[in-house]
Image (tube, coloured by chain):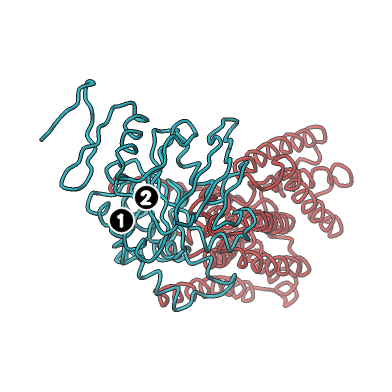
Amino acid sequence: MLLTLGLSVVLLGTAAGSQGWQAWWSVGADAVSHQIVWDIRLPRSLGAWLGGALLGLAGAVAQGLFRNPLADPYLLGSASGASLGVGVYLSLWGGSAWAMNAWLGLGLTGAAFVGAVLAVVLTLLLARGVQQTLRLLLAGVVVGVVLGAVTSLISLLQPKVLQAMQGFMLGSTAFVSWSACATMAAVLALCLALAWVFARVLDALSLGEATAQSLGVPLPQARMALVGVISLATGAAVAHIGLVAFVGLAAPHLVRSLVRCTHAWRLLLSALMGGALLVLADVVARVLLAPQELPVGVLTAVLGGGYLLWRVYRDADSGVRS
Amino acid sequence: MSAALQTWQLSADLGGRRVLQDIDLQIAAGRWTCVVGPNGAGKSSLLKALAGLLPLSGQVLWQGQPVASLTRQQKALQLSWLGQGEASSLDLRVWDVAMLGRMPHQSWLAAPSAQDAQMVEAALRATQAWDWRERTLGELSGGERQRVLLARVMAGNAPTLLMDEPLANLDPPHQVDWLEQVHCLLAQGTTVVSVLHEIGMALHADDIVVMREGRVVHHGAGRDAATHAAIEDVFGQRIRIHALDGQWVVLPRLGGAITSID
């Protein structure tokens, strides 16, 4: 039992690594200069891995906490918050393509992060804390819709913002710098540690809130910490790579279908899986229309959506059989 | 006889409706108490209140101490609660589910000890769920799942067990198994409180609490004629309790006439 578990972890780990290495390798082989590899492609691939890992982790925590396999990291309004942050920033200070300007890019990252975190805070306020899961989910949906409407209004009033916004909404790993990698790595380490500490709470919660409470779980504190993990991880990811779709939803599903394990392992593996998925998607997005580049978010949306649809049909079929 | 659990002026509301009304109850230690009554009588709420899982007015005492004053871990160690239809995500393996029962005994980040593993194995074997230990809850039938959840409660080894509908989905042989497990637990000094819809099984309990509309209408020994009369009464005289081979059987009372089989 433990052997199979350990083996799958190692397999997943090496898979995540090898894909990462493969991406860097191919980039290294056809690079014109060391500088391009080192300053652009390496941080980009690493950034894609880190961003994917953050989304995978946030997705796994969200699915465990809300006990809903359809929960994704953007559930608490962070995605729409980040979009609004970017929209407001662009309409106030921007106008030129956001990624062209490093200074502007950095400001955007901050705006997206602040927007994401503020949206989660707003959701928490509306839900009056983290005590009621359903209320939290509803508040997240409301915040998402309302902030999304405000963002649409801004881009409607200022059409020049629209194109730059689009780049962010689709998600792209093209402009990740070393400092961005460092930030994401730090956030990932912190979030993984926090999530690991509260992983047992997620196990207990799978038997229902009352059961978890009867087992002596410090539910309010755990919920607060786990919501913190979701918002921090999602905020850091969307701030740097934009709204990459489906990685946070698909990675935990993929892990669940491959390995039977408790949440402690599921969280770790979902992060590894999310990283591997996004690096892979990033490589494909770069070579598919080369020398043109597809926004990675488009690819993850298509691939992730297709995968989930396939799973739904497969589960439905097996459900009929049993 | 000492009381394991005691309530005083216990009332509780759920969704703006009063579900428990001024309940004064003494649950005897080391005995099996069964709570019976029609749907919506407040049986599950009473069990939740005893487990300290329901906001309430009045008081619940565990061995003389207010349950509300116990720490989370103390409460979890002393009172083990099994709800009905609680599991919402079925991805966990059977072994991991049963191991959750050991949670109150474990320190926060520690790996399960040899004793934990031993207790979990014993509990899974007792409910005949051991063979599925590598399977997930989602791969089991309703009755099989229930046996795993029972194992989870038994693995906790708490001196007081509160079980809501433990026989739900169980086939007759496994209902009998459960009865035997309860007798084993009682022999070890465990206090068992259960909510049962299977009145025939409930009549094996030492004591029976009969509820209607959030109130306790009768509390007496399972073999007492007065208890039987109270049960027949809360069910609107639609059932009759008969003696058969030294046990009690419950038969439906069709069309207002008493049906007699013997």
Q: Nearer the viewer, residue B192 or B166?
A: B192
Residue beneath disc 1: B178
**Amino acid on which disc 1 is placed:** Trp
Residue found 67% across the figure and 52% down from its top: A171
Q: In this view, does A29 lie to the left or right of B258?
A: right
Residue beneath disc 2: B166
**Amino acid on which disc 2 is placed:** Pro
Mark 1 → mark 2, Cα distance in angstroms: 8 Å
Corner quadrant of residue B115: bottom left
**Vertically, is A250 above or below A197?**
above
Image marks 1 and 2: residues in contact by CB distance under 8 Å: yes
Q: Earlier in the sequence, mark 1 or mark 2?
A: 2
Corner quadrant of residue A60: bottom right
| Crowd around label 2: few <14 · some 14–19 · many ≥20 (10 Å) | many
Q: Could you say where residue A217 lies in the image, as x and y percent from the top left?
A: 59, 59
Q: Could you say where residue B207 lies in the image, as x and y percent from the top left?
A: 37, 47
Q: Which chain is cyan?
A: B
Determine the residue located farthest toward the front in the rendered image.
B1
Residue found 42% across the figure and 74% down from its top: B117
Q: Colour of chain A?
A: red
Q: Could you say where residue A66 lies in the image, as x and y percent from the top left?
A: 57, 49
Q: Which of B143 and A234 is in front in this view?
A: B143
Q: Which of A177 and A322 is in front in this view?
A: A322
Label 1 sits on a secondary structure element that is helix
